[in-house]
Image (cartoon, helix red, strand yellow):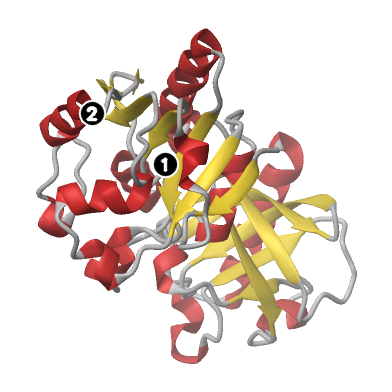
C-alpha cells in the first residue's frame, strides 16, 4: 500500500522533485484511472524516480454541484483504492473554496511549490483552477517553463466507448451493474448501517437487513438485484431491493433492503457492505401479499442458483 500524504502547509513539496504524477479526481478508481496511473508508474520506472497519484480530498463537484452528484465511492474509499493502485505515494490536496478560487498558475504554484515534478499525466479534457480555466494546453505551457513533461492521455476505451465515471454512473442508474463491473474492474459497492425496518419481511418469513443510503451514494437505479453482502469479514449471497418498495411506499423506513441467504444473526447497528452483481427485475406494485412472496422467493432462488 502506498503512503498517503495531505498536501497541506506542513507537506514537504520537495517530495515532488523528479517524481511522476497521475493527476485527477479518480471517482470510482475505474479501469481508465488504473491505466492513467500505470502510465505514471511506468514513467517513474524509466526515470528511476517515485510515482504519485495526485488527487483531492473531495470531489470538486461536491462543492459546486451539491445534491446533484452521484458518487461511485466515498472519498475515504477512493483514497484507499488509490493507495492500492500501485503508485508509490498518494498526495491529497485539500479542496477548499480558497484553493478552488486560485488562477491556474497559482493553483499549480500552490500544489507544487518551486520544484515541479518530472512529469504529470492527466486524462483527456483535464481542467483545473478557478472556473476550470486551466486546460491541458495551460498545463503543457506551464510544464515547458518548469522542466516538467506533461502528457494528456486519451481515455481508455472498453466495450466500444471511453471509460469514464459519468458513463459508469449512467450504467448503474439503469441497473446495468454487469456492464458497470467491466468498466470498474470490480462490482459496484455501497456501505451502510443496518436500521430497523417495517417488519413485514420478518412477518413473511423473509428477514431483511435495512439500510438508509444517502442520495449522493445511491448511484444504482431502483430495482431488485442479486448481490453479495459483507458482514464482519464474511460474504453472503443476497437478494437486494434498492429503492423504496412500491408496495410499502407509504410506510418505508429504508431505501435498501437485503435478504441474506443462510444468515440468522442480529446485525442491527452494524455496518455492512452490499456488492451488486446482477439486475433481476424492476420495482413494481403487487396485487396481493401471496404474489409478492412468490416473486421474492423466486428472486432468492435465482440468487442461490446463480451466485
Q: Residue at x 11, y 30 (%)?
A: 137
Q: Is residue 299 left or right of residue 12?
A: right
> Where residue 294 is drawn, which disc sits there?
none
Quarter of the image containing the N terminus? top right
- Whether residue 298 is visible to the viewer of this picture, yes or no, is no
Q: Is residue 245 left or right of residue 150?
A: right
Residue 228 at x, y percent in the picture = 70, 49
Please say if 268 is above or below 301.
below
Residue of label 1: 176
Question: Which numbered mark, 1 or 2, is in the foreground of this view?
Answer: 2
- Whether residue 139 is visible to the viewer of this picture, yes or no, is yes
Please say if 219 is above or below 52.
below
Residue of label 2: 143
Q: Is residue 149 left or right of residue 93?
A: left
Quarter of the image containing the C terminus? top right
Q: Farthest front residue?
A: 114
Label 1 and label 2: CA atoms lie apart by: 41 Å
Amino acid at each position: 500500500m502506498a503512503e498517503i500524504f495531505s498536501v497541506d502547509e506542513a507537506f514537504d513539496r520537495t517530495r515532488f522533485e523528479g517524481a511522476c504524477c497521475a493527476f485527477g479526481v479518480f471517482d470510482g478508481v475505474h479501469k481508465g484511472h488504473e491505466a492513467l496511473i500505470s502510465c505514471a508508474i511506468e514513467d517513474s520506472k524509466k526515470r528511476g524516480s517515485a510515482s504519485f497519484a495526485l488527487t483531492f480530498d473531495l470531489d470538486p463537484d461536491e462543492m459546486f454541484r451539491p445534491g446533484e452528484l452521484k458518487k461511485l465511492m466515498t472519498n475515504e474509499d477512493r483514497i484507499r483504492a488509490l493507495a492500492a493502485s500501485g503508485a508509490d505515494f498518494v498526495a491529497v490536496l485539500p479542496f477548499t473554496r480558497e484553493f478552488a478560487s486560485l488562477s491556474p498558475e497559482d493553483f499549480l504554484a500552490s500544489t507544487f511549490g518551486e520544484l515541479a515534478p518530472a512529469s504529470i499525466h492527466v486524462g483527456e479534457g483535464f481542467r483545473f483552477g478557478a472556473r476550470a480555466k486551466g486546460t491541458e494546453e495551460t498545463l503543457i505551457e506551464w510544464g515547458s517553463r518548469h522542466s516538467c513533461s506533461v502528457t494528456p492521455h486519451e481515455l481508455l476505451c472498453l466495450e466500444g466507448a471511453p471509460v469514464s465515471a459519468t458513463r459508469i454512473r449512467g450504467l448503474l442508474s439503469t441497473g446495468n451493474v454487469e456492464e458497470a463491473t467491466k468498466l470498474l474492474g470490480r462490482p459496484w459497492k455501497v456501505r451502510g448501517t443496518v436500521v430497523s425496518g417495517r417488519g413485514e419481511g420478518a412477518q413473511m418469513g423473509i428477514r431483511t437487513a435495512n439500510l438508509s443510503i444517502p442520495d449522493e451514494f445511491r448511484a444504482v437505479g431502483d430495482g431488485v438485484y442479486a448481490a453479495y453482502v459483507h458482514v464482519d469479514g464474511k460474504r453472503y449471497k443476497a437478494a437486494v431491493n434498492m429503492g423504496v418498495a412500491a408496495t410499502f411506499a407509504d410506510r418505508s423506513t429504508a431505501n435498501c433492503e437485503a435478504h441474506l441467504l443462510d444468515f440468522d444473526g442480529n446485525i442491527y447497528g452494524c455496518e455492512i457492505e452490499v456488492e451488486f452483481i446482477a439486475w433481476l427485475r424492476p420495482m413494481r406494485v403487487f396485487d396481493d401479499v401471496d404474489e409478492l412472496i412468490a416473486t421474492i422467493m423466486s428472486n432468492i432462488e435465482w440468487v442461490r442458483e446463480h451466485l
